[in-house]
Image (cartoon, rainbow, N blue to C red):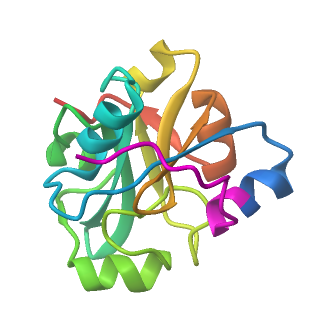
């Protein structure tokens, strides 16, 4: 079972992006268990955080272009809702290798923050129900806690009901 890490906040592209934007955040490093089947649910369990507040970052192909969806780890992405939110006709999961190349992060550590190139981003509207949420900090075993409004602002995201 994974445990909280003794490490302090690592510098990642995500933390650097928040620093440049002047956004306050709380780092949550922990020891990632390589046997974990769900990175987000692992983080919620290890950090003792309600899974509704821990968000996963998914890269989708939407009408032939990449987009980012941010949804609670306990739920699933509704691809039709994501396509609607972006004014597109269809959406599907992106190839993992394409997601890694486009974001600069590895699968399981993809953050919506500090990606190599900006992508259209949609955050599930349920994130706004919480004073703070957690997202990947840019590597496996590292989450960042911040206000959902700051997440939306820094990523240039829109909000929509994209989770089920």
Relative to 78, 71 lies left or right? right
How many discs mark residues in the rendered view?
0
Q: What percent of the width, then of the height, locates residue 160?
A: 38, 31
The answer to whether residue 86 is visible is: no
Residue at the location (50% across, 20% down)? 128
Relative to 149, residue 16 above or below:
below
Residue at the location (79% across, 41% down)? 23
Report if residue 5 lies within the magenta region: yes
> Is residue 50 or residue 65 the one in the foreground?
50
Residue at the location (34% across, 36% down)? 46
Q: What percent of the width, then of the height, locates residue 9?
A: 67, 54
> Is residue 159 or residue 108 the one in the foreground?
108
Quadrant including the C terminus:
top left
Q: What percent of the width, then of the height, locates residue 126?
A: 38, 21
Residue at the location (39% across, 57% down)? 68
Q: What percent of the width, then of the height, locates residue 6?
A: 57, 50
State which quadrant residue 116 falls in.
bottom right
Relative to 68, 20 lies left or right? right
The answer to whether residue 125 is visible is: yes
Q: Which residues are magenta?
A: 1-15
Relative to 92, 102 lies left or right? right
State which quadrant residue 71 falls in.
top left
> Is residue 94 or residue 114 the one in the foreground?
114
Q: Main secondary structure of the magenta part?
A: loop
Report if residue 16 lies within the magenta region: no
């Amino acid at each position: 079972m994974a445990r909280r890490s003794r490490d302090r906040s690592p510098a990642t592209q995500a933390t650097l992006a928040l620093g440049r934007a002047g956004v306050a955040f709380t780092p949550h490093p922990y020891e990632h268990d390589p046997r974990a089947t769900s990175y987000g649910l692992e983080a919620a369990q290890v950090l003792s955080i309600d899974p509704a507040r821990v968000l996963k970052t998914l890269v989708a192909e939407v009408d032939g272009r990449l987009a980012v969806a941010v949804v609670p780890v306990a739920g699933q992405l509704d691809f039709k809702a994501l396509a609607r939110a972006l004014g597109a006709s269809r959406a599907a999961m992106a190839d993992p290798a394409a997601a890694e190349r486009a974001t600069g992060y590895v699968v399981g550590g993809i953050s919506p923050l500090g990606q190599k190139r900006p992508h259209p981003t949609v955050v599930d509207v349920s994130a706004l129900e919480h004073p703070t949420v957690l997202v990947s900090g840019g590597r496996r075993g590292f989450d960042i806690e911040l206000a959902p409004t700051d997440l939306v602002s820094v990523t240039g995201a829109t909000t929509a009901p994209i989770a089920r």
